[in-house]
Image (spheres, rainbow, N blue to C red):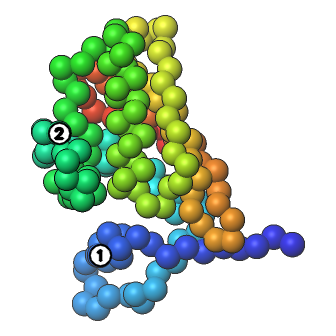
Amino acid sequence: MILHRIFRPSVLDRLFDDFPQEGTERTSDRRYELAHFRWTVRRDVEDILNSRSALALDISQWPELEKSPLNYGLPDCSNLSAANAEDREWIRQHIERVIDLFEPRLRQVRVQIHLDEKTGISQMIFRIEALLDVEPSPEPVVFDAVLDVSTQLYRIDR
């Protein structure tokens, strides 16, 4: 038996006005199928990676600040080098951490880094593996993210 599962959109998606030309809102309990739900998670992970944390200081003595909107996004990585293994590992760990903190629909997030021989150090490739937190059972998801080192922008391939 094939189950047809539908999912409730995130709060942010429910706030978007998809039909601004209409005078009234459509039903407030919009539902997504799994493919669209995955797409919204991918989009939101890409937004997290392309956001920069406003906190540039060590907040370890204030653990409640860790989930603050001020800490949303990655720290600035512009002073790091893709050629340096320690810098690459630092970036990988921070990607894993911010997704864990700010994307509640994903569990058991693991990030691997790959270097592309063709692009050298101009791009860094990350594989993000996680479980999408859906009922009745979590769904595995994989996102391939590319960091353009010169622009510091991440793109998650569709």
Question: Where residue 106 sits: x, y (%)?
Answer: 50, 55
- Tell me which numbered mark, 1 or 2, is placed earlier along the sequence: 1
Q: Is residue 6 above or below residue 137?
A: below
> Mark 1 is on which residue type?
Leu
The answer to which quarter of the image holds residue 64 is: bottom left
Q: Residue at x 69, y 71 (%)?
A: 136
Q: Is residue 11 above or below residue 74?
A: below
Mark 1 lies on a secondary structure that is helix
Question: Where residue 130 sits: x, y (%)?
Answer: 56, 47
Question: Where residue 31 sits: x, y (%)?
Answer: 52, 77
The alpha-carbon separation of the residues under discs 1 and 2 comes to: 33 Å
Q: Are marks 1 and 2 in contact (CB under 8 Å)?
A: no
Relative to the observer, which residue lies in front, 25 or 145?
Answer: 145
Using the rendered image of the protein, determine whether residue 45 is visible from the camera's viewpoint.
no
- On the image, numbered disc 1 is attached to which residue? 15
Left or right? Give the position of 98 relative to 129: left
* Quarter of the figure that contains the N terminus: bottom right
- On the image, numbered disc 2 is attached to which residue? 58
The answer to which quarter of the image holds residue 78 is: top left
Q: Is residue 44 above or below residue 78?
A: below
